[in-house]
Image: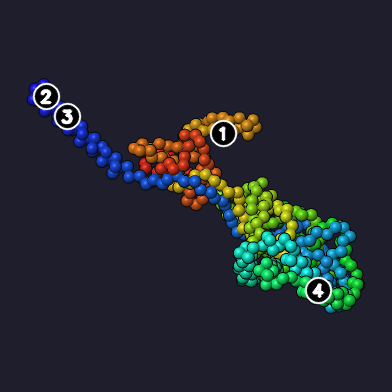
Amino acid sequence: MNTRTARLLLAILVVFMMLTVINVVVHIFKNDYVTETAVAVSASNSVSFKGVYIRDEKTIEYTRGGVISYAVKDGGRLSKDETAAYVYNDEKQIRINEQIGQIDAEIAVLKKIQNPGTQEVAQPAYLAGLIESAYRNIISDKENGNLEKLRNEKEELIIYLSTMQYVTQEIYNFSDKIASLEAERHSLESQQVKPVEEIRVPESAYFVSYTDGYEDFLNFEKAQTITAAEIRSVTDLNAEKVKNGSIGKLINGYAWKIAGVIEDSKDYFKEGNSIKLYFPSSDNTLDAVIEKVRDGDGENEKVIIIDCSDMSYDFVQHRVETIEIQDDEYKGIRIPREAVYVKENMPKEIIDEYTGEVKTIEGPVPGVYIRQGENVIFKKIDPVFQGDDFIISRMRPEKDYVQLYDDTIVSGLSVEGMAFE
């Protein structure tokens, strides 16, 4: 090989190396993609609204004179012909009955505390935690004005404090206290008189000791046609419609409904969906089902009717209440909304609703562009949830679907395709 040929080959090699370096540099500076790593997340839709309770209710009336003493707590179940209330000539008998009830409850607690097994099971450190928790709950209930829960928390705190005294042997037994309470109870019993009358229920039902004037209006039939304006007009008490002589009401069956008006521009909440209801006033969470969704008065406004089947004291204390509704939790891969495109005429699988057969057809498919080294490839997504700025894609094992920890290109990419709506 002569010198000229060697120099020519060397020049070609130098040019090739320079082109390679230039190509690498161009790729580094040209492909300035902004990417986001695909990670696993979970989310759910939630919205707060004014909920209106709808029940199958019947008013109980008593027009003769006397003072009413209720025999069952609100939300309590009564059998046919069972006593709902007693009638006395004056309030003295009611106060006596209340005192006897309080004494009975206190005696039961003291006997429970000094049960032989209590000292072995209840440890001071554990009790200290319960005392602290009960104290915090009392403060919270006081601030929120939840008097019924405050009363219950107070009773629990007394139990924990008394138990602590017993297990730490500050007090060896409660025999003297129990004897004193029993003597007080005996004295009160001697002052008791029989009620003038007993008010019995004509059928098996749940009992509530108040009426609000909506008993005849807000029934199951009305739930099928109630409008957004009517829901907004309901208050906790419609005094003009309260019947004279009403002393309470019966609720037929354990099923009841909630009507509300919500904003739902993306139709998240559909008929038949299982949901959870959260009641801030009582910290209750309840499983329920959406029975009906109708258009409201405004754009994106929906009238929603919810089926419930759990009766208790908390759910009969109001006619209207602020409620938070949450649908099922969705889990999958988080995808930034601006990274999603729709490609036309791509193969996709559908399930025949009649035969259940999986078919492959061509049509628009949502997906994202993934950066793999120097390559950019399109991967499909399977949306199960849409947030304001992100989408959750179901985790799928197929390689042509986005996978965990893929580098999703968010910006810096010029491609054909439609934005995902």
**Which quarter of the picture shows residue 239?**
bottom right
Secondary element at image label 2: helix
Spatial CA distance of label 1 from label 4 is: 76 Å
Q: Residue at x 62, y 69 (%)?
A: 135
Secondary element at image label 3: helix
Q: Position of residue 147 (x, y in %)?
A: 68, 70
Q: According to the image, label 3 marks what residue? A: 12
Q: Which of labels 1 and 4 is toward the front?
A: 4
Q: Which of labels 3 and 1 is toward the front?
A: 3
Q: Residue at x 65, y 48 (%)?
A: 274
Classify residue 218 as left or right of residue 194: left
Q: Which mark is residue 415?
A: none
Residue type at mark 1 is Ile
Image quarter in which the N terminus is found = top left
Q: Which of labels 4 and 2 is toward the front?
A: 4
Q: According to the image, label 1 marks what residue? A: 350
For the residue carrying disc 3, how many other residues have a C-alpha within 10 Å: few (<14), some (14-19), or many (20+)?
A: few
Q: Circles 4 and 2: CB distance less than 8 Å?
A: no
For the residue carrying disc 4, how many other residues have a C-alpha within 10 Å: few (<14), some (14-19), or many (20+)?
A: few
Q: Circles 2 and 3: CB distance less than 8 Å?
A: no
Classify residue 174 as left or right of residue 348: right
Q: Which mark is residue 5?
A: 2
Relative to residue 173, is residue 278 depicted above or below?
A: above
Which of the marked residues, 1 or 2, is nearer the chain's N terminus?
A: 2
Spatial CA distance of label 3 from label 4 is: 111 Å
- Can residue 146 be seen in the rendering of this structure? no
Classify residue 348 as left or right of residue 111: left
Which of the marked residues, 1 or 4, is nearer the chain's N terminus?
A: 4
**Which quarter of the picture shows residue 415?**
top left
Spatial CA distance of label 4 from label 2 is: 121 Å
Q: Which mark is residue 179?
A: 4
